[in-house]
Amino acid sequence: MAVTIKDIARSAQISAVTVSRILSNKQGHYSAATAEKVRKIAQKMGYHKNIAAAELVTRKSHVVAVIISATKTNFAEKIVEGIEQSAIKYGYNIVLLTVEPNNPQSQTRALKVILGRPIYGVLLLSLDLTAKNFRLLQATELPYLFISIGVSDKASFISSNDFQIGYQATSFLIAKGHTKIGIAGMTDDAYIGQQRVAGFKQALRESKLSIQDNWIQFGDFTYEAGIKAMHEYGPNPELTAVIGTSDLVSIGLLNAANDFNLAVPQRLSILSIDGTQLTKIVRPQLSSITQDFYQMGYQGVQTLIQQANHKDKAHYLPFKIIERGSTSQLP
């Protein structure tokens, strides 16, 4: 937890107001000895002045920090585009910070950049913070909002419902006669992947269909994860359909299936999650669960500006299934 002015005041046994005036170099009724004592305590405790919190009170800051994972995905582009357009409309600037995937230290470094800077609020794109880093985020005392990741047990967010994405994707394939369905490419230790797999399993259970362990192939949402998953399924898979948990994963599945001479969709149907422009530039074009990433970004800025008092709120955006050439009805 970040050190606060109250912590220093408690240690120095003086009022928080006096500590604030000393650390802000403001004149007041305190001695030079008291000022020296406070500054030494602040240095020893590792205090970092949060200019951002003061700027928020006076509404002088018009900068939004956007923290995004450096994972090799393509959907973030539309989210950032939505953020930029919304920020322009409301007279705000954005600062973009990237963090290394699955790296708590990288998360911490990005959050500490925000401390001591005039930032209005923070948007976090598809970033599943560790508990320690979430506490650090809260300690900034800034409005914050998660985008494209549902974290209802933590904080406010704008996202698609990842459980429903997994559930609806699987139900779509079941309705087409598929009974042996896989899901591939998602992380196994983060919220998004866990929720999509949970929805996948629920749909299969409701239809009384079996689930084989090797039909669930974890990864990191990348093209390479799709290639790896298809190689795990093998050149003659028992499956008749696979859900790729990102467009890049699905293209990896498609290309590896082509290498195995597996006809898509005649022998193997592939349903992609995300529905970015990538689904239209491959052959066959990929059927997809299509999310509105632009609106996630656009509404993210609106919500952040409107929630200065920051009340937890979950906001799911609708998604739709668009059928293209990579899925077919089983006879």
Image (tube, rainbow, N blue to C red):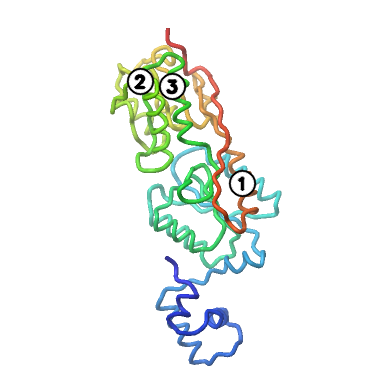
Residue 163, quarter of the rendered image: top left
Q: Earlier in the sequence, mark 2 or mark 3?
A: 2
Where does the image place residue 26, in percent across and percent down from the top left? 60, 83
Identify the residue at the far top of this view: 331
Amino acid type assigned to the residue bearing label 2 in the image? Lys
Quadrant for the N terminus in the image: bottom left
Amino acid type assigned to the residue bearing label 1 in the image? Ile
Q: Are marks 1 and 2 in contact (CB under 8 Å)?
A: no
- Nearest to the observer: residue 105 or residue 59: 59
Q: Circle 1 is placed at which residue position? A: 83
Where does the image place residue 149, in percent across and percent down from the top left? 49, 43
Marker disc for residue 208: 2
Label 1 sits on a secondary structure element that is helix
Q: Circle 3 is placed at which residue position? A: 270
Where does the image place residue 92, in percent across and percent down from the top left? 66, 55
Label 3 sits on a secondary structure element that is strand
Judged by depth in the image, the label closer to the viewer, 1 or 2, is 2
Q: Earlier in the sequence, mark 3 or mark 1?
A: 1
Q: Residue at x 42, y 13 (%)?
A: 177
Label 2 sits on a secondary structure element that is loop
